[in-house]
Image (spheres, rainbow, N blue to C red):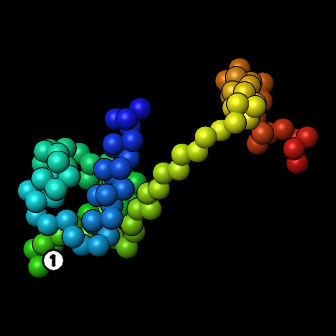
């Protein structure tokens, strides 16, 4: 669980630095993020899979989103009361069995 949170935090930080044009060079960026250059380029490829283009500007000394798109990355975590959790688990079980699809259930329309 902590690994997932670390990765989400890293994606949010990287996205903020790219938006602010404050990444520095690839070496500086990877050091700042405490990852290897190879990992940095893997994360950038992950960003590109969402349809954003990243380019490096020597004059800015930063990566930037170059095709008019940016990412909006957020994360929300909240404590769910046990009664609601049990209800959600029951719905997930029904959906997994193909017994419940709220998008096709006419009683919900």
Q: Which residue occupies the extreme bottom position in the image?
A: 59
On the image, the x and y values in percent for residue 104 come to: 80, 39
Location of residue 46 with respect to 27 vertically, above or below: above
> Which residue is depicted at the point 34% across and 35% down?
3
- Residue 35 seen in the current view: yes
Q: How many marks?
A: 1
Quadrant in which residue 19 is drawn? bottom left
On the image, the x and y values in percent for residue 31 come to: 12, 53
Q: Of residues 17 and 59, which is closer to you in this image?
A: 17
Q: Which residue occupies the extreme top position in the image?
A: 97
On the image, the x and y values in percent for residue 17 come to: 27, 65
> Which residue is depicted at the point 39% across and 66% down?
70
Query: Label 1: how many residues lie within 10 Å, few (<14), some (14-19) or many (20+)?
Result: few
> Which residue is depicted at the point 17% across and 45% down?
35
Q: Which residue occupies the extreme right position in the image?
A: 107
64 sits to left or right of 28: right
Looking at the rendered structure, the secondary structure element under dot 1 is loop
Location of residue 10 with respect to 3 vertically, above or below: below
On the image, the x and y values in percent for residue 29 come to: 16, 58
> Which residue is depicted at the point 27% across and 48% down?
43
Q: Of residues 36 and 70, which is closer to you in this image?
A: 36
Quadrant in which residue 1 is drawn? top left
88 sits to left or right of 35: right
- Residue 95 seen in the current view: no
Q: Which residue is mark 1?
A: 60
């Amino acid at each position: 669980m902590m690994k997932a949170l670390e990765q989400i935090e890293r994606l949010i930080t990287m996205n903020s630095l790219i938006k602010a044009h404050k990444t520095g060079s690839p070496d500086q960026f990877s050091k700042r993020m405490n990852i290897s250059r190879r990992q940095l380029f893997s994360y950038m490829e992950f960003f590109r899979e969402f349809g954003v283009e990243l380019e490096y500007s020597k004059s800015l000394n930063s990566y930037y989103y170059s095709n008019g798109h940016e990412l909006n990355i957020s994360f929300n975590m909240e404590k769910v009361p046990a009664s609601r959790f049990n209800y959600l688990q029951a719905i997930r079980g029904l959906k997994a069995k193909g017994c419940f699809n709220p998008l096709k259930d006419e009683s919900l329309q």
